[in-house]
Amino acid sequence: MVSLLIWPFIACLILTGIHTYLGIHVVRRGVIFVDLALAQMAALGSTLALLLGHDLHDPEAYYISLGMTFIGAVFFSLSRQRREVIPQEAIIGTIYVMSAAASLIVLDQAPGGAEHIRSLLVGNILTVTPKEVFKTALLYTAVGIFHWAFRKPFLMISFDPDQARSEKYRVRSWDLLFYMTFGLVVTSSVALAGVLLVFSYLIVPALISLMLAEKIPSRLWIGWGIGLLASLFGLAASVGWDTPTGASIVCAFGFLFLFLAIGRFIRQGMNTES
């Protein structure tokens, strides 16, 4: 049984590595649901490919899905304004709801639509193959190298956009690059693990790391540790209790977040009293 979990666990570690970093950007930008929106657009692309007669694992389905996320990336980069009349998060939420509704309409026309909805939401990471793991690792490594090479503008625009503008950075262009590389990661992750699991790997480690640390390196290490623990607990629960793997890992993230948040609240209360 342990041998069956090796590749799913490695896939979880790969997801943890890139999503924790991107999640710190997303949380700091205040666009928490951009991952769900792009993931849902990727899912919409997959459903369109399904309606056109392609299998969800066909290359054509991946490219259609990627095309949809790139459309979202362009839109989100254009929707960010220095003086917002409409909050960007409201726009992101609207796109998410519309994409989800459109996916349901398309899947209603496809045979086995309910099963495909379940697959898109929670995935089936337990059946991941070594080939998929290696391809995903190579892609995420390339994205990671790209972000490392241009870490100064990416970090400055996420953490201090006014400073970035004062230093004459083209904020909208860098936003487009951020969302396009983000969309590339999300498209691959959704195909591997489903929408809900991708959101959990992106947001929960980032939130916990922001609660516990100030500096980015410390936040990354904490986030990676949380992703590791949630993956271990979720996989173990899935095998031990015969529950869906993706949903089990999502719940593990939720329990870790609640446990640490309550612990932090109690600690702050004790410090206040003393």
Image: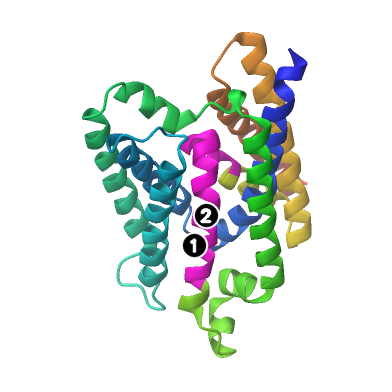
Residue 273 appears in the figure: no
* Occupied quadrant, residue 116: top left
Image height check: is 220 above or below 85?
A: above
Q: Is residue 82 magenta?
A: no
Residue 194 appears in the figure: yes
What residue sits 29% from the left and 52% below the top? Answer: 94
Amino acid marked by disc 2? Leu
Q: Is residue 192 magenta?
A: yes
- Disc 1 packing (10 Å; few <14; some 14–19; many ≥20): many
What residue sits 30% from the left and 67% below the top? Answer: 86
Task: Quickly name the residue at label 2.
Answer: 184
The secondary element bearing badge 2 is classed as helix
As rendered, which of 272 and 71 lies closer to the eye? 71
Image height check: is 95 above or below 266?
A: below
* Magenta stretch bounds: 175-201
Left or right: where 32 falls relative to 13: left
| Residue 265: image location, x then y, percent | 65, 41
